[in-house]
Each structure stands twice: as C-alpha cells, then as structure tokens.
Amino acid sequence: MNLRAECYEDRRFSPDEPRGADLRDCRFVRCDFTDTAWSEATLSGCTFTECRFWAADLNGLSAEGCGFLGCDFRGATALLQAVLRDCRLTGSSFGEAKLPGLEIDGGDWSLTSLRGVDLRRKKLAGLRLREADLSLCNLEQADLRGADLRQVLLAGAKVRGADLRGANLEGVDLGQLDLTGVKLDLDGAAALARSLGAVLD
C-alpha cells in the first residue's frame, strides 16, 4: 500500500493492509485499524483522527511528523522496535498497551491517557505531556529531562530513579510518590515543596 495525499473516512482496514506501507501526507478519519500489522511501514506527514488501533501490532512502524488525534490504541503492542518521531498524539489513549520497543523522539502527547502503561527507561526528554494521564504508569529510570509535565496526573505511578531535571512540573502532585533516586533541579525541588504544602517566598 503506497499512498500519497489520499483521504479515507470510516473505512475498516484488513489486518495485512498496512504491512510494508509507504504513506505520505494521507488523512484517515474514524478509520478502523483493529488487529492490523504495521511491520516495515513508513508514515510521513499523515493524520489519523479518531481512528481505532485496537490490538494493532506496531512492531517495525516508523512514523515521522504524523498526527494521531483522539485515537484509541487499546491493547496495541510494540514489543520490538517502533519509532514515533515528532508526532502529535493529542487526546489519544493507550489502555492495556504493551510498548517496550516503542521509541518516542519528541512530539506532543498532551492530553493522552497512558494510564498503567510500562514506560520504564523510556527516553521521553523534551516530550510535551501537558495534562496527560500517567496514573499507575511505571516511569522508573525514565528520562524526562526538559519534558512539559504541567498538570500531569501521576497518582500511583512508579518514578524511582527517573530524571526530571529541567522538566516543567507546574501543578504536578509529587507528594505521594516514592522519589527514591529521582533527579531534580532547583525548580523541581521547589515544585516538590509546593506539592507538600510548603509556601515558598
């Protein structure tokens, strides 16, 4: 499947259609990619709006400059390498997804729901995660340097050993977390103090 500047709405794709695909500047609206396999697929400048990726196999996917807006990745897997580079995933959800092989290189993941996803040791430096739901996530030893974490939900998350230096932690409740080994700069330490009820003067 090699497509350029095509547009699809309300279409269901068969499991093998995306395999090896080369998609450039295409638009997909409310399409169903349930159980699809994306090995060796290359996406550039594509936009997926309110699409369903339930149980999709993302292994081998390479996407650059793409938008996945309000998409549902429930049960999706990336056990081997998959790359999302400078992609926008605003409002998307990843319930029960297993993503140990996913590489995230920049982009905007604001308002995403990653609740309960294992993100251990992930390189998330500089990523925009404003108002994302990271509750119950495993973020141990994750690299979040310079990330935009404003208003992020971290209830029940594991953050031991995470690197939060330079991250914007405005409105983040750190007070109930085990911060053993967490790396903070002065601004991060101030955010921690505020979340514990301190008044900084």
Image (cartoon, rainbow, N blue to C red):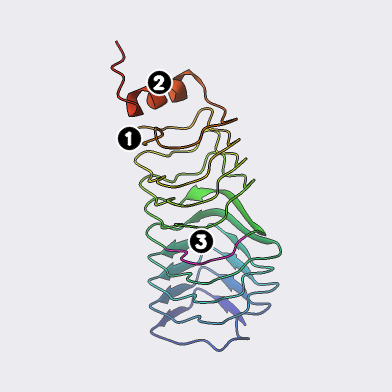
Residue lying at 58% horizontally and 33% vertically, measured from the top left = 163
Q: Position of residue 89 (x, y in %)?
A: 45, 58
Labelled disc at residue 66: 3
From what the image shows, is residue 109 above or below residue 40?
above
| Residue 20, quarter of the rendered image | bottom right
Q: Which residues are magenta?
A: 93-99
Residue lying at 42% horizontally and 68% vertically, measured from the top left = 71
Residue lying at 63% horizontally and 75% vertically, measured from the top left = 38
Residue at numbered disc 2: 190
Q: Position of residue 34 (x, y in %)?
A: 51, 81
Q: Position of residue 112 (x, y in %)?
A: 41, 56
Determine the secondary structure under disc 2.
Answer: helix
Pick the front one: 33 or 25: 33
| Residue 143, quarter of the rendered image | top right
Residue at numbered disc 1: 171
Labelled disc at residue 99: none
Q: Main secondary structure of the magenta part?
A: loop
Residue 86 painted magenta: no
Mark 2: amino acid? Ala
The CA span between labels 3 and 2 is 36 Å
Which quadrant is the C terminus positioned in?
top left
From what the image shows, is residue 135 above or below residue 199?
below
Pick the front one: 78 or 49: 78
Residue lying at 52% horizontally and 62% vertically, measured from the top left = 45
- The answer to the question of whether label 1 and label 2 lie on touching residues, with beta carbons closer than 8 A, is no
Mark 3 or 2, closer to the camera: 2
Mark 3: amino acid? Cys
Q: Is residue 122 left or right of residue 173?
A: right
